[in-house]
Amino acid sequence: MNKKFSELFSGYGMSINGNYGYGLIKGYETNVVIRMFDNVSPLTLHVSCYTTPEQTRAIEQTFLRASLKFFRFAFTDFGVSFGLNDITAGKLIKRMPSILNQIFSTLADNGALDSKYCPVCGNELTVENSKKTKVDGFSIQMDQACISALNNSINAENKDFEEAPNNYVNGFFGAMLGGFIGAIIAIGLYMIGFVSSISAFVAVLTGVFFYKKFHGKPNMMMIAIVALTTLAWMVGSVFIIYISVAYMAVQEANMTLTALEGFKLLMQDSEFAGFFSSDLSMTLLFSLLGIGYQTYALTKAIKRKKAIQ
């Protein structure tokens, strides 16, 4: 963890281990993690607390009215997660005491139960009935009965997922539809002079959407099918463009050739072949970048929950 961040949170009595911190702030169990390469929220803070639906709504409205800069929050099954940022790390560190004061005063003023209570059920924690667990990388103390109930739910969901049909064929048609949409965008961008990874981004996103819509199972096979289908459509879009150009060229020359024959003829011209090879290479490069980024994001997104230890 950045030395200044470490000093800041150590000052609140938190123990620091690498980029993670854990401890009690204002009586609330608090986890902090620093990810400096995260451009959106390099600092993530998770506060364990139990709130009723009415308290949750009141806390949400209070934070929304505060209109804090570079401030994101989301309620979790175990409390509230905050994503924080600023123009520089130094500015964020200067703002942190004020932000932390606002966070914990808002929780306390609205009746959020602190570390003495289970963040899942709200029951008082004792040495006999509580256990500190790891959830999504955070240390959270909770009632052992809640841990058992959560694990039963997770195991049941994972079992249902494993037993569900894969529907690869249906999913493939969904991926094809997504790839087709991406190819249309790629052709449109090419016509105005752009070769971009945007079309591959869109193709993967829409491919995944339709893959699921057609009842394909969201697993690693889905990612492979969507990625390969997208790549095929992106490469195909270049061929479609150049075959169309070749067909128009032979029509203008009053030659009785098919589009494919015209393309083969023009590929004998070094200039035409050079443009084709260049555009194909650029499309492959940008497509692989777009597909690679989305594949990384999807791999994390489809991970199944594991039982709480």
Image (cartoon, rainbow, N blue to C red):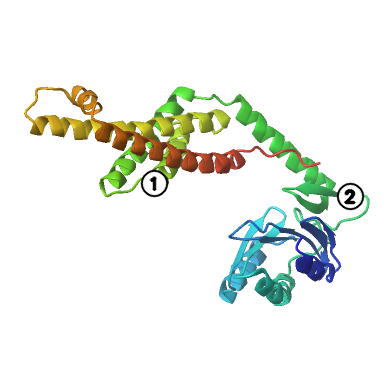
Residue 229 position, x and y percent, is 43, 30
The answer to whether residue 141 is above or below residue 262 is below
The answer to whether residue 175 is above or below residue 20 is above
* Count of numbered circles on the image: 2
Q: Residue furthest left?
A: 254
Q: Residues within 10 Å of mark 2 (few under 14, many from 20)?
A: some
Q: Is residue 37 visible?
A: yes
Circle 2 — which element?
loop
Determine whether, in the image, residue 281 is placed left or right of residue 275: right
Residue appearing at x 31%, y 35% in the figure: 274
In the rendered image, the quadrant that contains the C terminus is top right
Label 2 or label 1, whichever comes before in sequence order: 2
Q: Residues within 10 Å of mark 1 (few under 14, many from 20)?
A: some
Residue appearing at x 63%, y 38% in the figure: 303
Q: Residue furthest front?
A: 270
Residue appearing at x 13%, y 22% in the figure: 257
Residue 235 position, x and y percent, is 37, 32
The answer to whether residue 88 is above or below residue 30 is below
Q: Amino acid at mark 1?
A: Ser
In three-dimensional space, the C-alpha distance between marks 2 and 1, rounded to whole angstroms, equals 56 Å
Of badges 2 and 1, nearer the viewer stands: 1
Residue 261: quadrant of the picture: top left
Q: Amino acid at mark 2?
A: Asn
Q: Is residue 177 visible?
A: no
* Front residue (pair 20, 24): 20
Q: Which mark is residue 196?
A: 1
Residue that numbered label 2 is attached to: 129
Residue 297: quadrant of the picture: top right
Q: Which mark is residue 12?
A: none
Residue 272 position, x and y percent, is 25, 34
